[in-house]
Amino acid sequence: MPDKAILIVDDEAIILLSIKQSLQLRFGRRFRYETAMDAQSGLACIEELEAEGIEVVVVISDWLMPGMKGDEFLKTVERKNPSIQLVMITGHADESEIEKLCVNINMKACLRKPFNTEKLFEIIETAVEDFSKTE
């Protein structure tokens, strides 16, 4: 069982499944892949993984979700776990909102939906390398 995880948070099940399957095909058993359909479930998942001794390396989050939006979720993740690498995927946020978020947190990247899967893979590779430097 891998000791590192990637968490994907999106309120659309088809997007969660698509991203998870793409990552599994690309990275295989290198990581544990977890999903959550809202920010609160994502935060709980991070806590559960850490309690099991599994490091969350990357969190990929949608912007527009019910309850807590993705920007607030990523701010909360960074505040609690500054070494986790953060990636935003959005079809709704405008450039000024994204720029504000990048000023407030150390976000690795922001991809627009529909996004290029190969670009996501590149971002994940870089994020994992950067995470390793923080250990």
Image: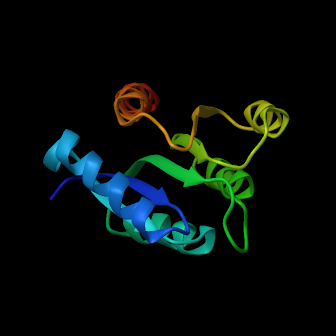
Image label count: 0
Which x, y percent locates residue 72? 74, 56
Q: Quadrant of the N terminus?
A: bottom left
Q: Residue at x 82, y 40 (%)?
A: 97
Position of 91 relative to 15 (above/below): above
For the question of whether residue 57 can be seen, the reply is yes
Q: Quadrant of the C terminus?
A: top left
Residue 112 occupies quadrant: top right
Which x, y percent locates residue 26? 21, 40
Which x, y percent locates residue 34? 36, 63
Residue 49 occupies quadrant: bottom left
Left/right of residue 47 with respect to residue 102 in the rendered view: left
Residue sitting farthest toward the front: 114
Position of 118 relative to 21 (above/below): above
Q: Residue at x 14, y 49 (%)?
A: 29
Left/right of residue 113 with respect to residue 76 in the rendered view: left
